[in-house]
Image: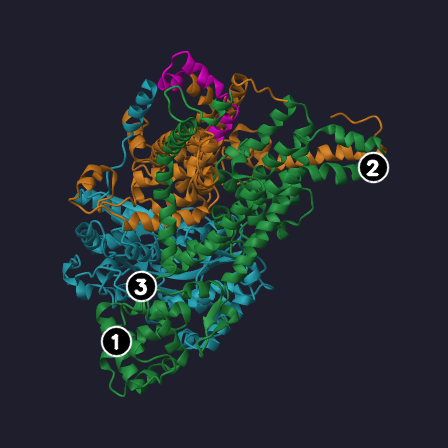
Amino acid sequence: MKKLLILTTALSTFAFAAQADVTVMSWGGAYGAAQTEGHLKPFTAETGIGTVMVDSDNPATPIKAMVEAGNVTVDVASVEYADAIRLCDEGVLETIDMAALPPGDDGTPAAEDFIAGAVTDCGVSTDVWATVFAYDTTKFPEGPKTAADFFDLAKFPGKRGLHKGAKAVLEFALMADGVAPADVYTVLGTPEGVDRAFAKLDTIKKDVVWWEAGSQAPQLLADGEVAMTSAYNGRIFNAAIAEGKPFQIVWDAQIYENEMYVVPKGAPNKDQAMQFIAYATSTKGLRQQAQHISYGPSRHSSLKEPLIFQDGKTEMGPHMPTAPANMANALGSDFQFWVDHDAELNDRFNAWLAAN
Amino acid sequence: MADVSQAPLQTADGRPLKAALAKAQARAKRRAFLLVLPLLAFVLLTFVLPILQMLQRSFYHDGFSANAPATVAWLEEHPQGSEIDETAYAALVSDLAAMQKAKTAGAAGTRINYTYPGTISIFKEAAREAAKLQPPYKAALVALDKKWEDPLLWVTFRHAASPWTTDFYMVSMDLRRSTDDGLQRAEPEMRIHLQLFVKTFGLSALITGLCLLLAFPIAHLLAILPMRKSNLLMILVLLPFWTSLLVRTSSWIALGQESGIVNDILVGIGIVADDNRIQMMYNKYGTILVMTHVLLPFMVLPLYSVMRVIPPSYARAARSLGATSWTTFRRIYLPQTLPGIAAGSLLVFILAVGYYITPALVGGADGTLISNLISFHMAKANWSQAAALAAMLLVLVLILYWLYDRLIGIDRLKLG
Amino acid sequence: MALPVYASPLERVWYYAFRVICALVFVFLIAPILIVIPLSFNVEPYFSFTEKMLALDPAGYSWRWYDTLLTFGVNAPEDAVRDGSWWAQVWAEATWIKAAKNSLWVGFWATILATVLGTTAALGLSRPEMPYRRLITAILLSPMIVPIIIIATGLFFAYSSTCLPQGNILADAFSPFLSAKGCLANTHLGIIMAHATLGIPFVIITVTATLSGFDQSLIRASASLGASPRTTFFKIIMPLILPGVISGGLFAFVTSFDEVVAVLFIAGPDQQTIPRQMWNGIREAISPAILAIATILVIVSIALLATVELLRRRSERLRGVTPQ
């Protein structure tokens, strides 16, 4: 009995981490690290409010479940633009007061400083990112150039990595099938268009390795599990520039959109969460993140001076989705389409995936 | 002695023996039960009640009924088969406008979308426009989307008008409502649940078979070796049993992926070409391989405990009577191992049917099981659908568990 | 069993073939567990043996992945001097250390809870007078059979929906153990209760097995010699069933220590355990750091298995059960 008591006391001296003040849920990997370095750490240093980062494959999914179950543990979540609008429509998010956002460091009011559409009722944009595809240059010296090449197993043999979800995958398949970016959502809005996208995916289905977390894509490429893979452009940039991996991004048929910070309804530390968002989306906050990953900041004032990667030499500009050279055949993700069709197309996608 | 036998037997303090015994028996019963009671209460509280509460959700969803009061009222006044007239559409449009204000169009549309897939988008669109719509409302809605005049949509509304529903079991069996309020199979491209149940059972049976195939020889070897040696070899069976499942799964990933050791060896000895490595992780082969490894000890242990007590003299007798070794095995040895085979197979099968972690990590797209789908619906906040699938899985497992208890006896389960 | 003298040539072949088959199955069982140990010392971030490793060149091996376990999540420069304050920082901040603390804390209390409740219940269940024994045993053992996803789903709803409102006397008394809203969700207590439930069947099975060889006349002998029931329990029953109780407790501990699904559903950011971190690691970017933690866990399981085996033999010796 006495021994037990000693053991108990010994165990209870374990110091558990004090309840963190702001819990941020993001996408893990290089992106989560960029937000930790660019937003969380400097915010804590400046305000003394503790922060903690939690990873998720797609934060929009768990926060909806949390709010509906009445069990919210996250204060700030990083979600895609369409999800920020959809969850706001569904009453899952707190509204954000534009007036509370600081002006740019050049004095421009926030409303004018942010790029168009970057602030919505419930979210503030942190950056513009893109879904691209990338390959290993040691495998294909004469690499693929277009989305159609991604589906060309004869010319470029090997496994393909794709994100396990309907969004961006269906658009990519249609563009590979020859649909012009301007027509993609018109086509995808018809049952025949959906069938056409799945028919295109059928051509490579047996050679696809599906990834869920964003960091799996560069990992699959690095391990040689796939010959080319779709990925978030920043993940490939970091693997190539910071880790020296022989990866090349193909910008053809890239799909770009805003990433948003949102606050789930019932967040345990709502006030600190709003304070965090105001800090993170300030001119400085956006620049700090953009120095760690190649996603374009969403304020004009953050782009006034050229951005340099944390290695001190790589210029970020040409690596951003919005660089003119990368926009030749690019598609802006249509948030209204995905607000309306997200559930339906993912149901169909999952049934398609499960069918042999 | 005769008179004594007629009087009831009495205890030393003069009470009838029968009553005293009954009382003592009742006290002993009570004492035994009181020892079990704290645990029983704990398990009821942390296990049985939560599961029952979850099962209740499989029959309940108020997404539509709570957010479309006018439409629900119209449906209550007009029995099945009534013409869907302008008053119905007016009620619907007023509900849609209210939904837009209360941000509940998603909740209502989600409920309808479960049983009539492809309708959530028309809800969201119509809710945005509802405030601007002018009578006649039917024409106005149909102008937005033709689906609004689909009689099936109104059949679906009628079933969603009450929060209590069996619709989620219907969906779990890949059935949909038909326009005449009957049932029909879902469109081929939307069928997912039944085939996943079939796949789960098929893979579980295959894994059970593989476990039996691998476990039988080593259990036999352990049973016939001298105790000292078999105890030593037994450790090789028990170590995996004691090793973290995540450890075993991650080491299989290290071994089995395309750049892993198994492929390296196969390429090295020239069985497989370097550019044609075998993909055995992140698909159903990964699930089969790793689950067979993980569940193998659960097959070896019951087989071993049965085989150890089979007297070797029977086999020798058969041989001395002229049976070949194959006949001896088939007619004498195998029948005696049947209880062990039944126990091990049922146990492995029960555990395999509900497996989650391994398929989630190495199953890829085609190697996931019904548990993974439940978790998927949970993540998507489709509580009722997850609960309905969980209920079906639970019933199947409980039937197998009951069978196990009847055939083998749950109290005879041994660990190592 | 040696090869009988009357064996035919075919049987001789089979005799050896059988042993080869058995050896292969044992390799299949054990190789995946042992292979992680050398791989975790790989200097390269790969899952394969490099040529240097195969040549047993020390340059091919390193402790770097073990070092990663210490430094991951620590807010300090990589080249920081490893003095006392650095170690203090690691102890407080390192992700894996935090996870280990959570795992041990939850595992310890879940084991205590499962062992106390389970042993008491096993004592009751093994009494011949126990009413409804079969049904109750089936209920108590069912957490082992019911798919974990169903249990986790049930607990997710139960823990987030049943809360003690603020101001309630009970809520005040329990407030250090409950979440801010007075619920069990995202609390250590909630996970401890869930893990105890999962561990209980193992305690019942092992303790019942020990009790099955228990000579009930010892209790009567003790009582006839004037011992109180209390004395009998602590001096006679307890020493005899102790090996079973400890084995059961170890099983319960291992169950908790390896559990990830319930944690995925009911734990918050402050209750991340080792398996939860491994889950993240395997899904995101599987690096040899995972194999380093796996190696540590393999060593722990070898130690636990050895303990249980020693206890089992001791118990058999004590009870006079000799192995056939």
Residue under label 1: B70
What label sits on residue A81 in the rendered view?
Answer: 3
Identify the hue of chain B.
Answer: green
The 10 Å Cα crowd at callout 2, few under 14, some 14 to 19, many 20 or more, is: some
Tell me the amino acid under the disc marked 2: Thr
Up the image or down, B86 lies above or below C136; here it is: below
Question: In the image, A298: left or right of B215?
Answer: left
Residue A87 x/y as whole percent = 29, 63
- Considering depth in this image, is B46 or C302 the residue closer to the camera? B46
Q: Which colour represents chain C? A: orange
Label drawn at residue B324: 2
Magenta segment: C206-235
Q: Is residue A17 left or right of residue C56?
A: left
Estimate the x, y position of residue C43 in percent, counting from the top left. 49, 35
Q: Is residue B301 magenta?
A: no
The answer to whether one can see residue A140 in this image is no
Q: Look at label 1 and name its amino acid.
A: Ala
Identify the element where label 3 is drawn.
helix
Q: Residue at x 39, y 47 (%)?
A: C152
- Chain identity for the colour cyan used in the image: A
